[in-house]
Amino acid sequence: MIPSLTVRDHPDRPFRAIFQDFSGCRILNTETLLQLATRLSYCKANYLFVNFEVRTTDRYQLPYTNRDLFHMMQVCEELFVTLVPSFDTQSNYIEPGAARDIIEYFLNDFPLSKTAHFGPNLTSILIANRNVLAAIQRRVPKIFLSSHVDEKNATLVHSYFIIVVLRCIEGTMVCDLSTGCEAMPPSLSYMSLLSALGVAWNGSCDMKKFAFLQPAIAAHHILMDGDMTALFEQAATLGRVEHELTRFSCGIWRPAMANSTISEETEAQSSGFGINKKMPISVFVEMILNPENLNLERLTPVIFKKARIELRRSLMALDAARKTLPYNFELALVLAEIKLVTELMVLTSRLGQALCMHGAKAGKIREEGVPYSPGRVGVGHLPLTVRTDLANSLLEIRTQFQHVWLSRSIPSTLPNALKMFDNLFRALLPPDLQEVGKQLL
């Protein structure tokens, strides 16, 4: 017997869940969702939450047909994965009777399901109206409820569910949420999904020691090709560039000075961003969704230029990986998704660099000798030639996005997904080209 070689049959966490949020415009097609369930079932995931949101002002309707829902339930059962229908409304300001009717409609679409999950808005209604919860419990034996517990409602929650206080942690759920910036493809979340499953299976593992193996693990288990590790290495590079630039923008992090004794933690505390503070919105997402009123107070052209250099290296690495790519649709699609996000980040870096250059206030110098960036600016500050050049590049990225989106998601969701690009495109176009822009979209 070799002591260091151990095959473990029992996981540390019996609950290992993946949460797919379809409350926004990103709704994966049936083929993509089942492919994800198949891959993750090999990695010991045992719950797949499929979340929908219904607006109380609209007529109740799910994006899938009853045949699709039945097929998904059947396939997940064969994979030993419990498909959990998840549901929530956009508000909790509805009558308990109306909430019960909506839940009944939802459960009718999953007649064979013995589990269900309700989001925070419906949970608050069910907790406050125990009779409604009891009626739902008679239809579905096992119910998952999500609720934000704070000082205001902790007593109420614990009074209804004493078991909440007594039970220990049962497992982990990694959530792939709808963020409003739907350019993020599913392939960029593969590494985090696998990491969460691995930690749930072996809770004593220090994930930080093995973080460098994430790209290789994702390539082996998701793409079934260990030679495609470079794809996920570049995906990790994108996340690192975005994360560091956002932290720098919000004053959470900045490079240490040569003669400075201030640590990163001290800098964060002095800036008012402690560990418990809410993480701010990404700089790249903000520039895409709100290009006319940006706060670039702490950013400079040099910072965006460095980001562009790093992203260009990623594009070169992706091009090298493409040359060794075997004939496989899934591999080609993942490559196209990562390349699309990289090119979009290069474009936003160019936009940020131009805004810092043309919106800078002359004569205002920082302590370190670096010119101040412009503060709050918009694309209206840019020269017409720069705006036109950026708009042309965005138009090419938009075309690529359509092909990638239709390969993963339901076609009816494409118009809403394109609004993100269309709003930025209209903002970039000079006033005299707006009519021409309408014909191009």
Image: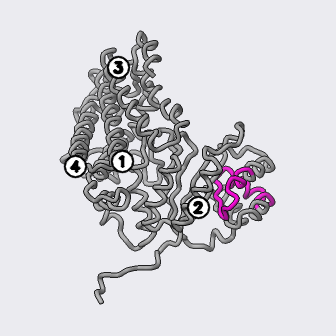
User: Which amino acid type corresponds to the residue marked 2 in the rendered image?
Assistant: Gln
Give the amino acid type for the residue marked by disc 3 in the picture.
Arg
Gap in Å between the C-alphas at discs 2 and 3? 51 Å
Q: Quadrant of residue 192?
A: bottom left
Where disc 2 sits, the SS reads helix
Q: How many marks?
A: 4
Quarter that holds the C terminus: top left
Q: Are marks 4 and 2 in contact (CB under 8 Å)?
A: no
Circle 2 residues within 10 Å: few <14, some 14–19, many ≥20: some
Q: Are marks 4 and 1 in contact (CB under 8 Å)?
A: no
Kind of residue at badge 4: Thr
Q: Is residue 172 left or right of residue 248?
A: right
Where is residue 50? Give x, y as percent: 57, 54
**Numbered label attached to residue 387:** 3
The quarter of the picture where residue 156 lies is bottom right
Q: Is residue 195 magenta?
A: no
Q: Which residue is mark 4?
A: 324
